[in-house]
Amino acid sequence: MSPAQRALAAARAARNADRSLHLAAGKRIAVYSAVAGELDAAPLIALAQRRGCRIYLPRIDRRQSSRAMRFVELGGELRENRYGIGEPEGAATVAARWLDLVFLPLVGFDLRGVRLGTGGGFYDRAFAYRQLRSLWRRPRLVGFAYAFQQVASLTAAPHDVLMDAVVTDEGYVQCTTG
């Protein structure tokens, strides 16, 4: 895709997220800082900020041996982590379970909510508690992707945390788990 096509797809996906998920003032929303190949979340962040949402970005624990991820309120400069992903410097963190909505980057997805990520497992670890609960399912996990990233079927590993929905440049996909 050309840069112009990618920018148009990101803007369409942001509008689809707003229409489908009703972004509103006060909601705690986690988004990601896109890297090469991922759908750019910047238009979604800008739209959510205009709606009065509190925006959080994931930050990987800086200790080299750690595989933990926290969510930090967006504000100020972003610093690249060891994977080249921009992370906020702030100290105001929120536990994953207190977020209302989390937009997840992905490489591929299926209608069951199985997400193929880049292999770090950070999101699966951060939301593993959802596999132990049947009633309280906060936050809502929503993939943010190009429509062409949908595949017929993916094999879920036992540790995979399934998504509730996916927003794409072509619309909203409710997963069978949500």
Image (spheres, rainbow, N blue to C red):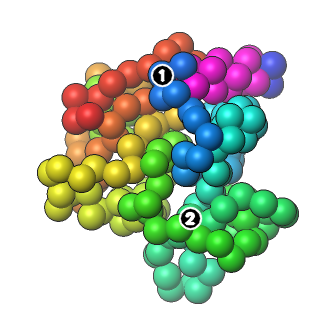
Q: Is residue 126 visible from the viewing direction of this image?
A: yes
The residue that appears at 63% across and 66% down in the rendered structure is: 72
Q: Which residues are magenta?
A: 5-18
In this view, 158 is above or below 15: below
Position in image of residue 27 (x %, y %): 55, 46
Q: Residues within 10 Å of mark 2 (few under 14, many from 20)?
A: many
SS assignment for the magenta stretch, majority: helix
Asked if residue 105 lies left or right of residue 4, the reply is left
Position in image of residue 154 (x %, y %): 28, 36
Position in image of residue 57 (x %, y %): 63, 57
Quadrant into which the C terminus falls: top left
Asked if residue 21 lies left or right of residue 60, the reply is left
Q: Which mark is residue 71?
A: 2
Give how far apart the Cα atoms at labels 1 and 2 are: 23 Å
Of residue 22 and residue 105, the one placed in the foreground of this image is 22
Mark 1 highlights which residue?
20
Residue 7 magenta-drawn? yes
Asked if residue 175 lies left or right of residue 23, the reply is left
The residue that appears at 75% across and 71% down in the rendered structure is: 89
